Image: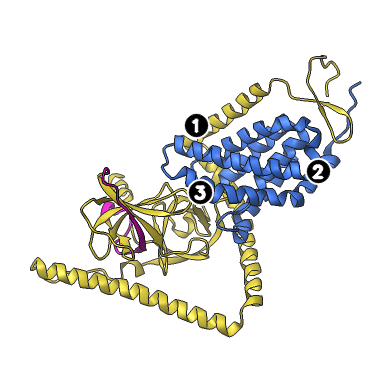
Chain colours: A blue, B yellow
Amino acid sequence: MRLLLCAPLLGLLALLQSSLLPHFSIIGAHPDLVLLAVVSWTLLRGLTEGLTWAFVGGLWLEALSGAPFGLSLLALVIVAFLVSPLETTLFRQHIVFLIATVTAASFVNGAVYLLLLRLSGNPGAALAALWRIVTPAALYTGLLTPIVYPGFRWLHRITWREQLEW
Amino acid sequence: MTRNRTLHQPLAWTEKGAYIRRARHPWRWLAAFVSLCLFLIGLQSLGYLAPARDLLLEALTPAQAGLAHLATQARNVTQTLHDLQTLRQRNAELEAEVNRLLVENVQLKEIEAENANLRRLLAFAEQHPFFQYRGAQVVARVIGRDPNNLANFVAIDLGREQGMREGMPVITERGLVGRISRVSRNSSQVLLIIDPASAVNGMIQSSRLTGVVQGQVGGGLVIDYIPQDAKVLPGEIVITSGLGGQFPRDLVIGQVIAVRQRDYEMFQQAIVRPSVDFGQIEQVLVITDFVPVAEDEEATESP
């Protein structure tokens, strides 16, 4: 059921990221909506759902991308894993914390992607790309958090069934 | 959620004030998902995922085209607010004129260089395909860009059904854009020359020095493998050399803006500014009558 929810939603976000957002790029970088969704959901729901969203979102990105298969997918899964311990922090709803987390996650995603690109045999100035592309994209994605995150929180509330354990 | 949770199971705080179960053994979860990813990468490299991807893209292409159209419209409206109609029209006319003159200039220089060569070699008239990239072309609309900031691909609205094949060169009136790297039924992915995976055999127009024009992570272009003793100056035009048979000759790639020469290296490099503005391309031309060498050989070998 949860997959039925996340697959079309992430597909729509990937489509927007591919078709619409490049028209609103700033200094050559556009925000990473799918990553924002994955990080938000991981903070709200924890590791297993975060990894599932990362996997599904990564598959959508791979479908729309011409880059070597698997790089976006692996980078997103790793980012979801790294973000998941923050699920337990009490500040996770604080807007500054959210912006900082999403910005850092986006930066790590770019860095992991570049590392995987290098490992797969593609040359290029990775450090320059980190500064010129990954950093602006991370900041742009982070700044979108206050607009997008409340939507995911709302979705989390309406899909979450409180289950008492005790 | 299970009722027989052990006391050692880690807890997490939910926003509604209750405790939920956290995933146990996070490393195992990571290992499981990474293994799944690697399995899919394996399947993709063997070609098993291509039909599923084709099917998915087939379904997504209309939506992608619609969104691209919407984005273009939105941008046009914004632009109209800032520009007067007459200024825009005049600007477009001048731009078209500049493009025409740039192409004409390149062609004239090509003719001049060729004439000099012919005279020097005492060769007789040889037909030079001045307008070879004016051949069989089809206009395609860019309907999407790579969702990843670090990859430089665009999606166009023509695919296998419209005669697109892998390897076909893609250009605009300003110069070389790239080549088709993947074809689906009604859409194709174009690998831009600024992507690190792209390498084009190029030539500096005035000196006829050849090299490999390589894309850079971040969208730059570098022409590499220029001999150390050769003199390369900023401002020189870089065109395709036609060597290797992957691209037609004489397509404009860009202009040299800086030269990187280190004494301890075998070759020097030059940084090239692409003639095409890759951030603004909306329509491209696909050269359909050019068959890359590898494809040609495969066709010859097949019964």
Residue A143's place in the image compared with B66, above or below, is: above
Assess whether mark 3 and mark 2 are in contact (beta carbons under 8 angstroms).
no
Magenta segment: B243-265
Report the disc number at residue B151: 3
Residue shown at the point (68%, 48%) measured from the top left: A142
Residue B57 relative to residue A37: left or right: left
Residue B270's place in the image compared with B113, above or below, is: above
- Check the picture and name the quadrant holding the N terminus of chain A: top right
* Residue B226 image offset from top left, x and y in percent: 26, 52
The residue where tag 1 is placed is: B42
Chain ID, mark 3:
B
Q: How crowded is mark 3: few (under 14 residues within 10 Å), some or many (20 or more)?
A: many
Q: Residue furthest front?
A: B263
Which mark is nearer the camera, 1 or 3?
Answer: 3
Residue shown at the point (80%, 40%) measured from the top left: A93
Q: Is residue A107 visible?
A: yes
